[in-house]
Image: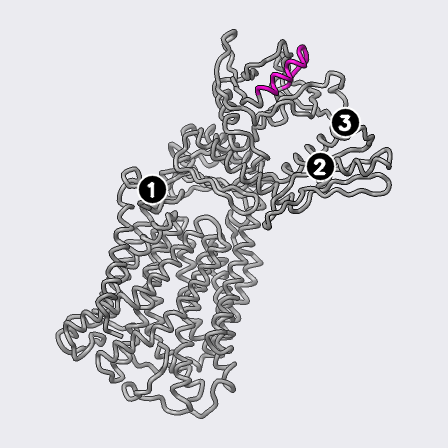
Amino acid sequence: MMFFARWKTLAILAVCLLGVLLCTPNLFPKAALPSWARQFSLGLDLRGGSYLLLEVDMDAVVKERLESLADASRTRLRQANIGYVNLAAEPANRRVTLRVRDVAQLPAAVTQMREQANQIPTSMGATTPDIEVSSTPDGTVTAALTEVGLRAKASGAVEQSIEIVRRRIDETGVSEALIARQGQSRILVQLPGVEDPNRIKQLLGKTARMTFHLLDETANPTSPTPPPGVMFLSGEGRGGQPERYAVRRRVEVDGANLTDARAGQDNRNGEWVVNFTFDSVGTRRFADVTRANVGRPFAIVLDEKVITAPNIREAITGGRGQISGNFNAASANELSVLLRAGALPAPLTVVEERSVGPELGADAIRAGILALALGAIFVFLYMGLAYGLFGWLADIALLVNIILLLAALSVLEATLTLPGIAGIVLTLGTALDANILINERIREEFKNGRPPLSALEAGFTKASGTIMDSNLTNLIAMACLYGFGSGPVKGFAVTVAIGTIVQMWTATTLVRLMVSWWYRKTRPTTLPVLEDGRGFWGRLARPLFRIVPDVTRIPFMKGARAGLLVSAVLSTASLIGAFYPGLDKGIDFKGGIVMEVRTPGPADLARLRSTVSGLGLGDVGLQAFGDAETVLVRLPVQADEGGTQQAVNAVRGAVEQVAPGTRILRVEAVGNRVSDELFLGGMIALGISLLAMLVYIWFRFEWQFAIAAIITLILDTTKTVGFMVLFGVEFNLTTVAAILTVIGFSANDKVVVFDRMRENLRKYKTMPLRQLVDQSINETLNRSLGTSMTLLLSAVPLALFGGDTLSGFAWVMLFGIVVSASSSVFIAAPIVLYTGENRLRRGTEVPAPAPGKDKARAPAGV
């Protein structure tokens, strides 16, 4: 196994070289690269920008379809001379109903209604109608939207909205904007470099559906209800005063037939107007309508508001027109942008908003790079000093690991966020786990009397199974986080998952190749794995320290009952604390608004608090944040999604009024529905992660090990929650990512101990289970503590220098690492002992074999 064919060596080196080449484009600006070159991009939290999550109003989509159906039905039934009463659209019930006066005309009425159905293509190439028409003997006809029709209408509305949103944003000149569908009815918009998305939100918040209608001059606009076929709409009269218009529902000309719209000034009076041009269909219809209705008022309606309603003086046949009103330059330009981009099929609501200024993004980049650099230095030094030559070789493999990780992100054109940088930092710690497993196994085999080559082969071979098992548990946790997480947290999951996969290859293949080169060149008679190593390499590259001695006989199981009791008490207290006083839920899970602002000078907190509190937005929290000029503003969740955006705008204006020149560094606004969904997603991720690990460990080990693992993971999770309650760590998506990472590491640690127990069960047929469990823990003690140490060394810089965004994540990680390492010994192992004492092993105590005397071979384990 230590021999590599030339083609294998070349293939391994080619992979490393390819990784370097794929990373290289990230060193150059995108404009200077060919089209095939790929780069990873920085997330909005690193380079600044705005994140908007828009939701299409599906109720409006349904209402529009039903009202259109009702209006068309009214026309068709009249043309067919079918008498009817009580024709009405019922959006709440998703249907249109009417009653035919003459029951004999019922079949004809049903036929007329069915002919208005839109045909929806199915997967088999056939079509199905979007409405289902039924009737009753008393003459009632019902046309109800089908589920297929509803889904098709919703999907079409979202796809059309995405295209319209893209056109509107392109009109504003924002570069590299990302517009993508998210879920069934939402649209994700990312705007790099846009600090204040207020204008964008205004553009996207308007449906901009322009239609042309005749006024009904016989209707009385002051009546409480309009007559059939008429709607009362508000607008501005000729004197600029509000006026109510009786507008016919029938759309004479649709704004969808516009080909151009431009802001300009009227040559007669200099007022700002919007000049528009129709396509051929619109030109013909506009000409027909104006020719047939000379002298009658013609209303131009935008989003159910009458902009203007001039009288038609003459037929307009040129396909050109002009919209006048109380416009200024900005409003005329905005309307022209909206009309050129097209109308949205339904209103869009901003349900989540996150904005980061470039100044804060630059701070985040500096913090992330500092944490990454310090974590790398600490981990590199620890591996080299603790494991000598083989530790330094592992460090080289770790550098390659990071290069391949960045190469994979480049190929995927992934977005690197601040949590993603945290994932890279943690990869520094987890990537060395496999090397620690291999080095500890090589050391053990060599001390047991194997010759150098045999010890190397046994170390890599016997560690490979455990490396696979332990890393798969981490991948399970990251898959759950990616599946149910949101936003930057998904970037963390992708980064850690790629790093985990790559490190399995670098540890078992690349390091093995480097060790084989060293062995062929030196042909050593000893290995540089012992502190008292002999020979040249032993003196030059020997380890300088061990966390614990190689041979320990600590009777851990004497404290089994005490460990379980203490754990139960701590977990119970943690659960009580989770409900009272409860977790400090962040904005992700409870909704609300958080704004970070920086004033030109020292902030006047009292005046700011008084002004913002006077807005009537609920309990307002203001506090200094980092320095005297920076203030954090917290507002509770508002009654509805639209209210959330109004509150953000109101606070912006109030802060600017108190301290002119104030910069908005960060805005996070999450509505009720989104926060509930994020919380549910986080809880589902935790639950499925625990269940998936139970299934996997049950499949790979005996059921006693699976039960022990899942109970211990649950207890570890509850203690971590208790830590968050005790120290006031905010519970948000980032800390859920930390908890899932802790679960992955905890399962990893337990798999290693369980694997050694399983190996010893095969190796020592008569040893009592209590003694065997103690021996297995002692044999894996250096490995468990070594991996914990590398993770601690990589997480400490995140806690100290990672900034406010990552500090909670890092402290939860640090606590979780300590808890996970101790729970493997004092919770998981005792559970295996008590559940398997009469099943896994029976027997009397026998003396443990002396180190170096037992030459028994085991099929797997570490």
Instruction: Measure the C-alpha gap from mark 1 to mark 3.
Output: 68 Å
The answer to which of 815 and 241 lies nearer the viewer is 241
Q: Examine the rendered structure and indicate whether residue 417 appears above or below residue 6.
A: above
Element class at badge 3: helix
Q: Which residue is mark 3?
A: 79
In the shown orientation, is residue 473 left or right of residue 105?
Answer: left
| Residue denoted by label 1 | 362
The residue sitting at 67% across, 42% down in the picture is 130
Q: Is tag 1's residue or tag 2's residue first in the polypeptide sequence?
A: 2
- Label 1 – label 2 distance at C-alpha: 61 Å
Is residue 50 visible from the viewing direction of this image? Answer: yes
Amino acid type at mark 3: Gln
432 shown above or below 106: below
Q: Is residue 549 left or right of residue 244?
A: left
Quarter of the image for residue 386 reads: bottom left
Which comes sooner in the sequence, label 3 or label 2? Answer: 3
The local secondary structure at tag 1 comes to helix
Q: Is residue 678 above or below residue 270?
A: below
Q: x, y (%) of residue 766?
A: 42, 91
Image coords of residue 860 (percent x, y): 37, 78
Inspect the magenta stretch and tell me whether residue 296 lies in it. Answer: yes
Name the quadrant containing residue 498. bottom left
How far, Cα to Cα, is label 3 from label 2?
Answer: 14 Å
Give the residue pinned by disc 2: 115
Amino acid carrying mark 2 in the image: Glu
Are the residues flagged by discs 1 and 3 in contact, CB closer than 8 Å?
no
Q: Which residues are magenta?
A: 283-299
Above-or-below relation of 285 to 64: above
Residue toward you, 558 or 10: 10
Instruction: Identify the residue shown where x is 51% and y is 38%.
Output: 162
